[in-house]
Image: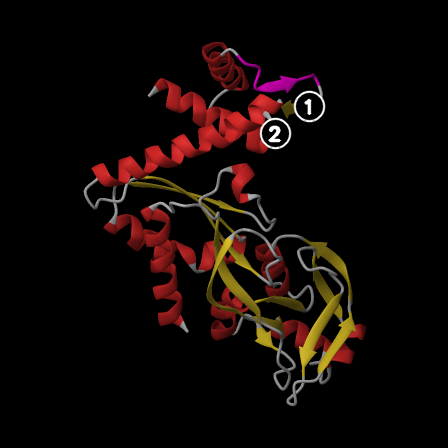
Amino acid sequence: MAELEELRTFIAAARIGSFAKAGRQLNLSPAMVGRRIQALEQRYGAKLIERTTRNQRLTETGQAFLARAEAVIEATAALDEISAAGTLTGRLRVSAPTTLGIRRLPAIIAQFTEAHPAIVFEMSLANRRVDLVAEGYDLAVRVGDLPSSSLVARRLGTYGFVCCAAPAFIARHGAPQHPTDLTRCRCILNLNLVPRNRWSFLDAGGTAVTVEVMGGVEIDSDEAQRMLAIDGAGVVYLPLDLVQDDIEAGRLVPILQGWRLPTMPIHTLHPSRDLVPRRVTAFIAALVEEFRDAS
């Protein structure tokens, strides 16, 4: 077992490229990461990672060792699943965007972990696109078009947006009647959108209109944008999931309702490998089922 932990530590350090970051992922100190890798090097009589004060790199032997180490860990996981006799076990590391992770996933996770109590579920919420292999994630849920990669994708559903403002803001400034009216409105810009100041709309015939908006607030937190909008700071362009309750309660009012906003696809992604752990495929199945019911 000790050697397996050393192999897992080496894989993490090699993929992430940092002893400190690998330690954070594995809940180990950088010194412990170093000791485990040194133990492997002494056991096999070969230098695996060259380190300087500024960076680290795999040696040629280390590159070959990494492929073999990953095969050993994958085979061990397969044996663990056989011995579990149908029970899902192990740690499931998932990455998801913040709003989706807060609004849509908790209920699914609660049901999944209730059904599979031997699973340790770990989820990181971030709007950046993590490197699943390098950072050791089993699965990611992502919003938006996917670049070409070796990762395996599964479509879950569609992510909708809404343009809205507080009733008090509309009472003071009036409701925009056309997307171009937004160029004269105080808008709250989302730093997670690229570009942040270009909002797109579709008319009834599907023709796109993109406008450049301005505002005195630019922020990377959807939740902070929501609260600013409720407090009357300006117009926001946010995920419908985030503000649906506020719209139903009257705290926010959709504007430009004669226009549609573009949508984005939602996918799961996981590394391509000969054996995909059953806990991964089971959670993907749970996501697919819940998103289908919600559509």
Label 1 sits on what residue type?
Asn
Q: Which residue is mark 2?
A: 17
Q: Quadrant of residue 179?
A: bottom right
Name of the residue lying farthest toward the left: 85
In the displayed structure, 25 sits above or below 2; it is: below
The residue positioned 54% from the left and 27% from the top of the image is 64
Q: In terms of secondary structure, where does tag 2 sit?
A: loop
**Quadrant of residue 72 in the image?**
top left
Q: How much space separates mark 1 and mark 2, taking CA atoms?
A: 8 Å
- Residue 235 vertical placement versus 258 (above, below): above
Does residue 12 show up?
yes
Q: Is residue 50 magenta?
A: yes
Whether pointer 1 and pointer 2 mark residues with C-beta atoms closer than 8 Å, the reply is yes
- Foreground of the two, 220 or 245: 220
Residue 149 horizontal side relative to residue 139, left or right: right
Q: Mark 2 belongs to which amino acid?
A: Gly
Identify the secondary structure beneath mark 1. Answer: loop
Residue range (magenta) = 46-53
Give the image location of residue 66, x and y in percent. Answer: 51, 29
Q: Whole-percent x and y of residue 215? A: 77, 63
User: What label does residue 55 carry, if any?
Assistant: 1
Instruction: Name the main secondary structure of what is drawn in magenta.
Output: loop
Residue 293 within the magenta-colored segment of the rendering: no
- Label 1 neighbour load within 10 Å: few <14, some 14-19, many 20+: few
Residue at 57% x, 28% y: name it: 63
